């Protein structure tokens, strides 16, 4: 695979669209990640986060079966788990509330998601170098 | 008395404005809300006598309720339009994401290019049909099970076999579940045409459905039963039931908490789908366990 930076990283997928969830899971596994989930609802996402002691990063679909995923986002932030939104909505819906979280707009290529996840998981320090958290 | 009509208007400072008009000798106007719910354009002008002497204030009221209502309606319809455009954008982007994933999944089944093209086209057409159904539905979102089934069964070229439909018309599906159910019905239909009851003269397909109450919530139970044919077990890989079967066994439980069962019996496919018609998904189906059916 092109990048192994996500190798052995435990990534939670919260995405209600089955085909999209499976495609992302497969791409992440190909990159060497350990996929948690995928889960399709706010309830299941919260249960999974509460039950998992170790999550390195998450991909969070904003609309889960008609429900907004904000309670999940809040829990991830409280647990200091880096994550990326994925949404068909325009960015500004999220920008007001979660200005620090990147939205990887649907549809996306895996390379873009990988980049967004890595960025969320390894913020640049002042020298511009990345440091894995 | 000026207060005779001011107490019918939300215009507390009419007297103050009148004093100002007398002082500055300049007219003034305001749009004022009436206690009757209407709107009035209130104009105050100094009253000049023929001797060119200022002798009071002339107040005129013009009923502008109609104009205000039109403006309000326009504002409201503009904001509705903005929301709809945003929602359309959201749906379109999601649909593109589904199409991309569908291309991945279809390619992953290892067919030849010609087979890949045929499967993908079929799936895209099914997706397009369901978008059409969704947009034509009167409430903008609801689609009934019988219309979805009818659209899927009649979409493909006439096969052989006898089709019996047995269930009530007008069962409204949850808008969020329409697309995935359509895709599942598409896979069943395609599969029946290729390998099953719709492929030959002697095949029979019965689709039976009912609405049942489960813990106070309505569910639709669908039974798809093919018979009268010799089943050729489709190879799990190329073009076979693999993809459709996964949609039914995995996608519907994953997305909507459906309970499903898919079996290839000696004389044809037998599939049951139990799908909630309201509310969020229930919890216990995660492992795809089937209840009594």
Image (cartoon, coloured by chain):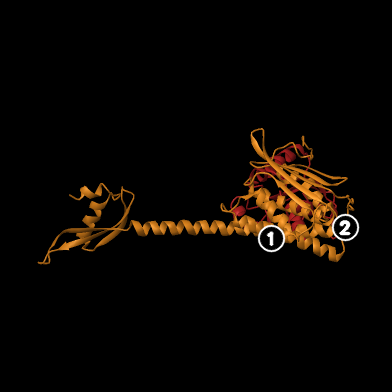
Chain letter of disc 2?
B
What shade does chain B have?
orange
Label ID, residue B193: none
For mark 2, give the secondary structure.
loop
For mark 1, give the secondary structure.
helix
Q: Is residue A68 left or right of residue A15?
A: left
Q: Is residue B56 left or right of residue B107?
A: left
Q: Is residue B232 left or right of residue B163?
A: right
Chain letter of disc 1?
B
What is the spatial separation of the Cα atoms under label 2 and label 1, in whole angstroms?
24 Å
- Would you name the residue on which mark 1 appears? B128
What shade does chain A have?
red
Q: What count of labels does the image hold?
A: 2
Coordinates of residue B142 in the picture (x, y in percent):
61, 50
Mark 2 nearby-residue class (10 Å; few <14, some 14–19, many ≥20): some
Coordinates of residue B286 in the picture (x, y in percent):
76, 40
B20 and A94: which one is in front? A94
Coordinates of residue B15 in the picture (x, y in percent):
23, 52
- In the displayed structure, B287 sits above or below B164; it is above
- Would you name the residue on which mark 2 appears? B238
Q: Earlier in the sequence, mark 2 or mark 1?
A: 1
Marks 2, 1 in one chain: yes
B105 and B168: which one is in front? B168
Instruction: Work out which residue is located at the far left of the displayed protein and give it.
Output: B51
Coordinates of residue B109 in the picture (x, y in percent):
85, 57
Q: Quadrant of the N terminus of chain A?
A: bottom right
């Amino acid at each position: 695979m092109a990048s192994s930076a996500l190798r052995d990283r435990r990534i939670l997928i919260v995405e209600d669209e089955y085909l999209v969830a499976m495609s992302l899971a497969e791409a992440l596994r190909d990159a060497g990640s350990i996929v948690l989930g995928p889960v399709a609802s706010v309830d299941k996402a919260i249960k999974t986060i509460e039950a998992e002691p170790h999550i390195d990063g998450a991909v969070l679909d904003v609309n889960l079966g008609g429900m907004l995923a904000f309670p999940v986002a809040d829990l991830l932030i409280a647990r200091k788990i880096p994550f990326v939104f994925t949404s068909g909505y325009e960015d500004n819906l999220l920008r007001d509330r979660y200005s620090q979280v990147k939205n990887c707009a649907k549809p996306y290529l895996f390379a873009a998601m990988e980049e967004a996840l890595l960025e969320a998981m390894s913020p640049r320090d002042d020298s511009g170098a990345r440091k894995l958290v | 008395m000026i207060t005779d009509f001011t107490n019918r208007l939300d215009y507390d400072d009419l007297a103050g404005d009148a004093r100002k008009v007398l002082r500055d000798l300049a007219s003034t106007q305001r749009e004022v809300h009436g206690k009757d719910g209407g709107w009035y354009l209130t104009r105050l002008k100094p009253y000049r006598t023929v001797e060119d002497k200022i002798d009071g204030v002339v107040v005129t009221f013009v009923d502008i309720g109609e104009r205000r209502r039109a403006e309000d309606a326009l504002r409201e319809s503009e904001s509705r339009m903005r929301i709809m455009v945003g929602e359309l954008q959201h749906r379109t982007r999601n649909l593109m994401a589904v199409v991309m994933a569908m291309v991945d999944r279809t390619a992953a089944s290892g067919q030849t290019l010609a087979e890949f093209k045929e499967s993908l086209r079929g799936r895209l057409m099914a997706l397009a049909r369901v978008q059409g159904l969704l947009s034509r539905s009167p409430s903008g979102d609801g689609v009934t099970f019988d219309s979805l089934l009818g659209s899927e069964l009649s979409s493909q070229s006439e096969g052989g076999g006898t089709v019996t439909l047995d269930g009530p018309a007008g069962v409204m599906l949850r808008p969020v579940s329409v697309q995935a159910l359509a895709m599942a019905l598409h896979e069943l239909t395609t599969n029946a045409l290729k390998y099953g009851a719709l492929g030959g003269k002697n095949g029979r397909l019965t689709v039976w459905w009912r609405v049942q109450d489960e813990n106070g919530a309505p569910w639709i139970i669908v039974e798809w039963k093919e018979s009268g044919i010799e089943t050729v077990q489709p190879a799990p890989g190329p073009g076979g039931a693999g993809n459709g079967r996964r949609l039914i066994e995995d996608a519907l439980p994953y997305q909507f908490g459906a309970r499903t069962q898919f079996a290839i019996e000696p004389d044809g496919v037998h599939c049951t789908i139990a799908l909630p018609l309201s509310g969020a998904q229930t919890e216990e189906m995660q492992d795809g366990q089937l209840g009594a059916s």
